[in-house]
């Protein structure tokens, strides 16, 4: 490890961190919105659930490098290419967890809500989603940790992030940037995971207190 | 039609998709204002299906249902439901909301302002016998009996004239159940709601109902009568078997001494019975005293034979 390299590149480390966070944030944000829409479709029309998870599952299995190769001719060496790939990897986990969370809402709660005069979508957003939060957030945690790791590969199509350090290190047979990129990527994944646990606790005050 | 009919079922039937036999077949009956009607019958008799058709959780295959003179299909289902309280065995409280927020569910759906909903919540906690300090608790922090009370409070929140209850006390232990039944009776004495109460337990039906609706498998109406009439004169073999062999003795607990014709007063030296006592109490007094008959305060006397005639 060359400490002098690190001290000389603190500015780069900061800007790569911002890039990495931005790529991850957009992917998770868009992925969540899209997954929520797909989950609503799957819940409203149950027949669509199997095809949705099948397509999301196929996307999940495509190696990311192959996906970039397929997308570059269409969308170029762009952020769009990176995000299309990143978002597509979040869908399977998020859709599955959102639907499982909604399915886990007790039938009696749904029955009571309906019988008290909830409309379908009001019940979805104010009763079912809050009660599904443990699984929704569990899905977000997995998707986030996975995405932070995947973002390191977007450097291959020139999108920065910690992957740029790793790539630099590999190309120059110089270990320091390689280690810095890898370690920071892991640290970021852990930090975001901890943040999501904190978010879960903040959003679910009822789960903190247990039966008397 | 009854004088103040609130709920009316007119040739209602329900056949679920994929089933050849109807769950409810051609059912007609009426429930009067302020009445507690208990729907009772063996499993498969369609009592829950019948209940759920009243708030349109289930749509009938044919027939019409009116609530307060209005066909229930004439308003959107969610609006109809906001005017009908609903209590179920599993309670179905919202685990993510506090007791106060659970109770204020329908007021919130109806758009009440916060202060009004808050006042109403405090009122309801008192009404169902829950301490105000439980307001900010979550359902998981309550006992089963407390949860059921919150369920009842929630159903009553917007003061609906009609209350539907589906085996509400089926999941609590027998002692708590008795207490909740007594509380419901006391509550009903004050509120005079029109209540449809589903149970499979004939004892519960007889204890709580002003009238008991006995259904047979396939939603066939076997008898609709007051508890005393039901136990005294079951209309057929099915009802007689359903109400059980101790129906005669059970009937004694439903009749007060003052409600039957008494014999001439006897001389001194006999036990005395209050006119407000039930015939079962009177029987116990007689058996304990070893006497054949007792004086009823001021009005006459009651003998073992006279009680026996009411056993039927």
Image (tube, coloured by chain):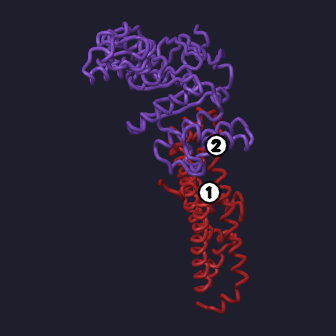
Q: Which residue is mark 2?
A: B122
**Quarter of the image with the N terminus of chain B in it:** top right
**What residue do we see at 48% from left, 17% from top?**
B211
Examine the rendering and report whether any part of residue A55 can be seen: no
Q: x%, y% of residue B158?
A: 66, 33
Q: Is residue B202 left or right of residue A98?
A: left
Residue that carries the numbered disc 1 in the rendered image: A203
Chain letter, red in picture: A
* Direction right: furthest residue: B113
Nearer to us: label 2 or label 1: 2
Marker count (numbered): 2
Residue under mark 2: which chain is it in? B
Answer few, some or many: residues within 10 Å of disc 2's Cα (few below 14, many 20 plus, some between 14 and 19): some
Give x and y (percent) for residue B259. Answer: 44, 12
User: Is residue A160 rendered to the left or right of residue B242?
Assistant: right
Q: How far is disc 2 from disc 1 in space, using C-alphas?
A: 26 Å
Q: Nearer the viewer, residue B203 or A51?
A: B203
Chain colored purple: B
Name the one closer to the observer, A78 or A141: A141
Q: Which mark is residue A29?
A: none
**Picture residue at 62% right of the left edge, 45% below the top:** B100
* Residue B82 in the image: above or below residue A186: above
Q: Look at the numbered disc 2 and give the secondary structure of its residue.
A: helix
Q: Which one is in front, A171 or B312?
A: B312
In this rendering, the answer to whether B312 lies above or below B155 is: above
Q: Tell me, yes or no, if residue B110 can be seen here.
A: yes
């Amino acid at each position: 490890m060359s400490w002098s390299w690190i001290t000389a590149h603190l500015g780069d480390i900061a800007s790569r961190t911002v890039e990495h966070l931005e790529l991850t944030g957009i992917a998770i944000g868009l992925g969540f919105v899209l997954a929520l829409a797909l989950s609503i479709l799957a819940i409203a029309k149950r027949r669509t659930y199997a095809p949705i998870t099948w397509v999301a599952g196929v996307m999940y299995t495509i190696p990311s490098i192959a996906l970039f190769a397929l997308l570059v001719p269409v969308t170029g060496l762009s952020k769009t290419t990176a995000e299309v790939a990143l978002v597509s990897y979040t869908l399977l986990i998020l859709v599955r967890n959102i639907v499982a969370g909604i399915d886990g809402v007790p039938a009696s709660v749904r029955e009571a809500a309906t019988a008290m005069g909830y409309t379908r979508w009001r019940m979805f957003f104010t009763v079912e989603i809050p009660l599904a939060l443990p699984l929704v957030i569990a899905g977000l945690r997995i998707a986030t940790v996975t995405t932070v790791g995947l973002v390191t590969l977007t450097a291959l199509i020139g999108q920065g992030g910690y992957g740029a350090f790793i790539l630099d290190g590999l190309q120059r047979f110089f270990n320091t940037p390689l280690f810095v990129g890898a370690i920071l990527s892991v640290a970021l994944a852990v930090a975001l995971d901890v943040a999501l646990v904190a978010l879960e606790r903040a959003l679910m005050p009822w789960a903190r207190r247990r039966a008397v | 039609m009854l004088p103040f009919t609130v709920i009316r079922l007119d040739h209602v039937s329900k056949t679920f998709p994929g089933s050849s036999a109807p769950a409810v077949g051609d059912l007609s009956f009426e429930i009067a204002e302020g009445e507690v009607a208990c729907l009772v019958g063996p499993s498969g008799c369609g009592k829950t299906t019948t209940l759920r058709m009243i708030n349109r959780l289930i749509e009938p295959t044919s027939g019409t249902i009116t609530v307060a003179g209005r066909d229930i299909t004439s308003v959107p289902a969610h609006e109809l439901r906001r005017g009908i309280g609903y209590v179920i065995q599993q309670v179905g409280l919202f685990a993510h909301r506090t007791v106060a927020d659970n109770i204020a569910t329908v007021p919130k759906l109806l758009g009440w302002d916060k202060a009004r909903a808050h006042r109403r919540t405090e009122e309801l906690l008192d009404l169902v016998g829950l301490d105000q300090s439980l307001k900010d608790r979550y359902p998981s922090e309550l006992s089963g009996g407390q949860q059921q009370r919150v369920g009842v409070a929630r159903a009553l929140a917007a003061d609906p004239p009609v209350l539907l209850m589906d085996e509400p006390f089926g999941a609590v232990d027998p002692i708590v159940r008795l207490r909740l039944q007594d509380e419901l009776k006391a509550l009903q004495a004050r509120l005079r709601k029109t209540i449809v109460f589903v149970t499979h337990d004939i004892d519960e039906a007889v204890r709580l109902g002003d009238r008991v609706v006995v259904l047979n498998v396939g939603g066939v109406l076997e008898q609709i009568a007051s508890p005393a009439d039901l136990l005294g004169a079951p209309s057929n073999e099915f009802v007689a078997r359903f109400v059980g062999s101790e129906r005669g003795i059970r009937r004694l607990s439903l009749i007060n001494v003052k409600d039957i014709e008494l014999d001439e007063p006897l001389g001194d030296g006999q036990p005395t019975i209050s006119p407000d006592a039930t015939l079962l109490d009177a029987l116990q007094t007689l058996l304990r005293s070893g006497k054949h008959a007792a004086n009823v305060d001021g009005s006459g006397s009651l003998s073992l034979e006279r009680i026996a005639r009411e056993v039927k």
